[in-house]
Structures are given as C-alpha cells and as structure tokens.
Amino acid sequence: MTRIGIISDIHGNLPALEAVLSALNAEGAETVIFCGDLVGYGPWPGEVIARMQGSSIGVQGNHDAAACGALPTNHFTPAARAAIDWIRSRLSAADIAYLSSLPLTREMEGMTVVHGSPRGPLWEYILDPWTAAESLSLLSTDINLFGHSHIQGGFVADGEKVEPIDPRAGTIELVPGLRYLINPGSVGQPRDGDPRAAYAILDLKQGTIAYHRISYDISAVQREIIRVGLPRELADRLSVGR
C-alpha cells in the first residue's frame, strides 16, 4: 500500500463521494482512508455507509458517534441536531453497528488517523500552529491524518517550529525528519470557501501529499436535502463552501 486516497467529512453526500472515489480510482489509489464523519447533514447516510464499508479504513467522527447514540447532541447546532435525529430514524441496525465499531484513533503503516485531534478525537479542532504542536506532542508517528474542520491543508513541524500547509501548492514533498498533520478537507461540506469536494493522495513511495478538488452536482444534493425535509441551511451552504 503505497498510494493512498485520504478523505474526510463525507456527511451523507453521496454524489460528492462518488465523484471523489472515481477520481481516486482514476489516479491509481490502492486504498482509501477516511478521517471520520461518514454521516451528518446530508440525505444519504445509509448509502454512504454501504459505499465505504468494506472498501476503506477509517475512524469515527463526532457525527458518526452521535448517530449511533455514543455522543450527546446538546452541543450541536439546531440544524445539526435535526439532521442527526433524521439520520437515526433511517439507519439500520447494521449501519449503527458499523458506526459504533469505528475506532476513535487508528495507527497503521507508520501513520496515525484521527477525526479531531489525538487529545480530543471527537471534539477538538486543529486550526492553528499551537494546537497542532500540542497534538504532535501526543503522537509518535511523523505522518498524521485528521479532519473535523472541513478545511483542506494541515501543518508541518520542523522541531518546535510549526507552520500551516497551503493546499493550493498542489503536490507537496514530505521531507524526512519533519512531522505532518494532514487534513484532506471535506468531501461533502467544505468550509474553506471552495464548494468543490476535497480529497488528498498520499504517495508513500514518492514521499508526497497531493491536495485535490473536484466538482459534483451540488444542485442535485440541495434538492434532495430539501425534499427529505432536512434544514434548508444545510442545502444553501453547499453552494458557498462555508
């Protein structure tokens, strides 16, 4: 396993997921790792679980935990709570069992995978160099994958110096001796101002991480969100990537 597709925060957006998986297949990804939140916000929770189960490796996100009853939703926004209630009424027992089985952290191939952060897998956001440094101090691996913020990029540490990674650079060389926190961005609900689905490709043989975006039929997803009765704001925000 040397060429790995990295995705996160699908949030029940099946058309976005299918676009990303097709791109990863075309680009020769040998496996897919996801950094949590298969469900939440979007209208295809069961379909996304079915698409990912057995064909990918990942961790549990906060919306996944809430959907299977492992996390209270009192700290969620009203729209997010409404979506979780709707999702719970539609997931099968097998879907819930699968979400419940996902670990909070996973170490594999010399990498650590987490949704939020190693300190708070289901709640903490890594948004600044200070939090990134705190997170890296808890990790033994040099390449670390996370999501939760829906913002593509991450951080790189050279000793105690930690700097953000600009995903607009495209393909970035992973320098031996440096440590990385890599966020592929959100497949299903980006929040960095770019509404296109986000993903990344980690090439362990070449020693690179490549950030990508791909368009999908946002209007079709918006129509389905409204049709099934989910909060309209969850549809509207897809157009602006916020």
Image (cartoon, helix red, strand yellow):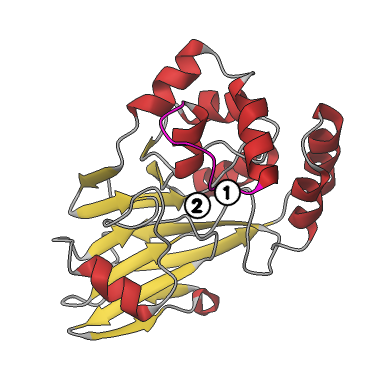
Asked if the residues shown at circle 1 and circle 2 are in contact, with their CB atoms under 8 angstroms apart, the answer is: yes
Circle 1 residues within 10 Å: few <14, some 14–19, many ≥20: some
State which region is magenta. 69-77
Amino acid type at mark 1:
Ala
In the image, 159: left or right of 131? left
User: Was residue 181 drawn as part of the magenta stretch in this picture?
Assistant: no
Counting from the top left corner in percent of width and height, residue 40 is at 60, 38
Q: Give me the residue at 79% from left, 47% from top.
A: 235
Q: Residue furthest front?
A: 74
Counting from the top left corner in percent of width and height, residue 57 is at 35, 37
Residue 37 makes an appearance in the image: no
User: Was residue 71 drawn as part of the magenta stretch in this picture?
Assistant: yes
Residue nearest the observer in this picture, 57 or 25: 57
Residue nearest the observer in this picture, 241 or 143: 241
In the image, 27: left or right of 208? right
Residue where numbered disc 1 is placed = 23
Q: Quadrant of residue 162?
A: bottom left
Picture disc at residue 97: none
Residue 56 makes an appearance in the image: yes
Residue where numbered disc 2 is placed = 27
